[in-house]
Amino acid sequence: MMLFSIPLYQPGYWLTLQPPEVGGGLGHLLFVFFLLVFLVGMTARIIGPQRVTDKYAKKIVKKIGAMLVTMGLLGVFLFFLSYEDVQLFGARFLYPIWLLGFLGWGGHLYWFFKKKLPQTRQQQQQLQTQRSYLPRKKKK
């Protein structure tokens, strides 16, 4: 099946319960992509926190790793169901839903890193500054 002969812009193509053919070269590329997403996520979850010293950067690496592991596993599972021609769970409309989920989660992480994390850092610095002026218990 050639890539240019697939009617990607027609809703009838995506809104069927028929799973796509994933046995060709494009199918193998899709499987490799899902597998790479999973492996990069595992690498980020295992090696990332060990190499990063800042606690906020560790949080970022863990969140990105969790997203990539989850979406990679879901993608491999979806690919397997499409490969086995399971009618409902391997359907074509699940691939754009997977892509929307991936982009949505990535957008949420971007918002977290750009908006929420700087506020949290600033609050932590203010709290630390306030604590420096408070009296402490004397050590004996």
Image (cartoon, helix red, strand yellow):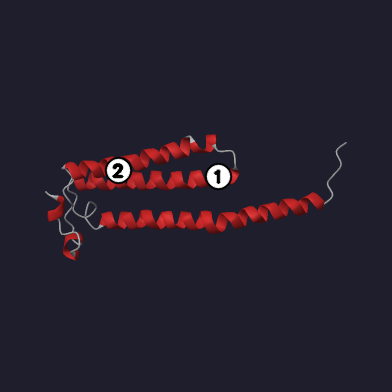
Find the distance from the CA under tag 1 to the CA under tag 2: 26 Å
From the viewer's side, name the closer residue of 8 and 95: 8
Q: Residues within 10 Å of mark 1 (few under 14, many from 20)?
A: some
Farthest front residue? 4
Q: Which residue is mark 1?
A: 57
Q: Earlier in the sequence, mark 1 or mark 2?
A: 2
Dot 1 and dot 2 residues touching (CB under 8 Å): no
Q: Is residue 88 left or right of residue 134?
A: left
Farthest bottom residue? 11
At 37% from the left and 38% from the top, the residue drawn is 39
Q: Is residue 53 left or right of residue 62?
A: right
Q: Which residue is mark 2?
A: 33
From the viewer's side, name the closer residue of 57 and 135: 57
Q: Which mark is residue 105?
A: none
Q: Residues within 10 Å of mark 2 (few under 14, many from 20)?
A: some
Q: Is residue 85 left or right of residue 47?
A: left
Amino acid at dot 1 = Ala
Amino acid at dot 2 = Phe
Quadrant of the image occupied by residue 14: bottom left
In this rendering, the answer to whether 107 lies above or below 38 is below
Residue 75 coordinates in the image, percent (x, y): 30, 47
At 61% from the left and 55% from the top, the residue drawn is 120
Q: In the picture, which quadrant includes the C terminus?
A: top right
At 77% from the left and 51% from the top, the residue drawn is 131
SS type, badge 1:
helix
From the viewer's side, name the closer residue of 15 and 118: 118
